[in-house]
Image (cartoon, rainbow, N blue to C red):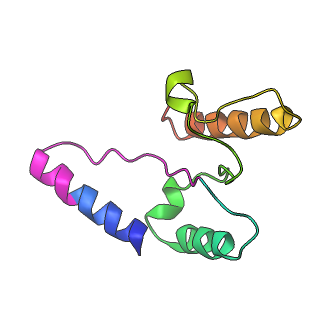
Amino acid sequence: DGMEVFIEQWKQISKVAKINFNIKAVLLNNVDGRTTQKEDFYGFCKEHEELQALLLDTFVPQAIALSQSETDCTPITFNKDSKVKHLQDIYNNIVKELKTKEVL
């Protein structure tokens, strides 16, 4: 419900502000893969008429710190631990999907 409300509110704001509806992608982040909520929400988004075209297949897991991403100009902060390869794969997949959707 939250995503539907957000999309509808942004459409109204866009109309009032006389700007284009410019949401081109939705990236799920802080996703806890240990619960069924991820699959339920992802499934809902994939079946929703408007969200399915916006939703990226790649998501940012809950375990990844995003606190430095703004200063690093990346959606994922890389650090020197054993998960670097996995983090780079996530980052590369996000960039690839954003390019496919012509966001980047």
Q: Where the N terminus falls, by quadrant?
A: bottom left
In the rendered view, would you say 41 is above or below 64? below
* Residue drawn at (58%, 28%) of the image: 74
1 displayed left or right of 96: left
53 displayed left or right of 79: left
Compare residues 64 and 23 and report the one nearer the observer. Answer: 64
* Residue drawn at (64%, 40%) of the image: 94
Q: x and y percent of residue 78 in the render? A: 71, 29
* Residue drawn at (48%, 35%) of the image: 103
In the rendered view, would you say 53 is above or below 35? above
Compare residues 36 and 20 and report the one nearer the observer. Answer: 36
* Residue drawn at (68%, 63%) of the image: 32
Q: x and y percent of residue 35 in the render? A: 72, 73
Is residue 16 a member of the stretch shown in magenta? yes
In the rendered view, would you say 18 is above or below 35? above
- Quarter of the image for residue 64 reads top right
Q: x and y percent of residue 3 in the render? A: 42, 66
Q: x and y percent of residue 100 in the render? A: 59, 38
In the rendered view, would you say 19 is above or below 55? above
Compare residues 69 and 50 and report the one nearer the observer. Answer: 69
- Quarter of the image for residue 98 reads top right
Most common secondary structure along the magenta stretch: loop
What's the magenta region?
12-29
48 displayed left or right of 87: left
Is residue 17 a member of the stretch shown in magenta? yes
